[in-house]
Amino acid sequence: MQKQTKKWLLSLLLVLLIGTLAACAGSTAYTDAQNIVEASALADLMAQEGVVVIDARSSEDYAKGHLKGAVNLSPDELNGQGTIPSMLGTPQQFNRVMSKGGILPDSTVIIYDANGGVSSGRLWWAMKAFGHENVKVVNGGASAIVNAGLEISGDATQVTSSAYSSKGMDASIVATIDDVKDAVANGTATIIDVRTPAEFDEGAIPTSILYPHTSNLYSDGTFKSARDIYLNYKDLGLEKETPVILYCKSSYRATQTMLLLQEAGFSNVKVYDGAWLEWSVSGEETTSPAGPVEATVQDAS
């Protein structure tokens, strides 16, 4: 009888252990994350002092319906006016845009979009680059907000302008063309191209590895877990301390990848600000002939 009891207890413990492990392995939600927040946590967060929610979609989509209380701000508003139109603008321009959105340097900023974290990632990266630390992206974007049953409004949120002052550019997360040249010539960093295979085949930066940004998403459009991201990029040969430079066509899609790599513990990651738009006209070597490339709304990347 005692042996049977022991066997039963051991069997029960084994079942409980397997269930616990399965639950842990199956959980893909981001809880207590540095850069990502679940839509289910938004209501409580928005009730706190100093929280600003940004809808990074187009003004047309915002007008059709947005999270009540969200401010519409496109990442395009932070682009400079130079020969490469997608590069970040000046600190003064950044300050003006943040002030218009009612954002202060100590605000907690939460961003959502409807394109797999591309627009949110771009705003997140730009804000980080100019020294704003407390900024997060909603996992699953606008769809997740609707699915969470949060209140949707068609009325524009009334904003009281602020007086924002940035800390200047943080070069630790922004790669220049000289950084990329050094990586190509001397292997100082692993270069990852997050564009589509078709774009990669038309021309790419030498030594770069293709890994499309869409590979960072599950089939429902939510971000892969930090564990899955780590394992996927480890398969590419990356360790958490590996120097990495990410690029796409216009440094939008690459920022989504950076967001997730940083969340997964990769600590030495930069986005090439000039991206393929700059490299393709620089006279530098490419993997195949590449003429001048124009930024388009369709690519938005």
Image (tube, rainbow, N blue to C red):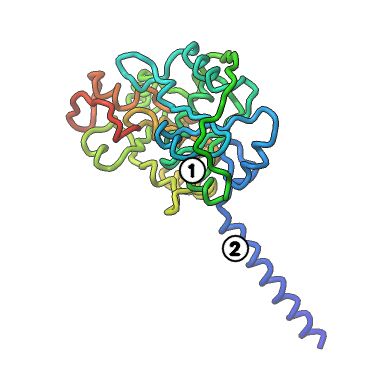
- Name the image quarter holding residue 162: top right
Element on which disc 1 rests: helix
Mark 1: amino acid: Ala
Marks 1 and 2 close (CB-CB < 8 Å) = no
| Residues packed near mark 2 inside 10 Å, few (<14), some (14 to 19) or many (20 plus) | few
- The residue tagged 2 is 22
Q: Please state which of residues 158 and 97 is positioned toward the viewer in this rendering.
A: 158
Inter-mark Cα distance, 1 to 2: 29 Å
At a point 25% along the width and 37% down the height, the residue shown is 199
Indicate the amino acid at tag 2: Ala
Q: Which residue is mark 1?
A: 142
Q: Residue at x 57, y 18 (%)?
A: 161
Most distant residue in the right direction: 2
- Would residue 58 appear left or right of 110 to someone viewing this image? left
User: Which numbered circle lies on residue 168?
Assistant: none
Q: Is residue 217 above or below residue 275?
A: below
Q: How many numbered marks appear?
A: 2
Query: Who is closer to the viewer here, 242 or 193?
Result: 193
Q: Is residue 284 visible?
A: yes
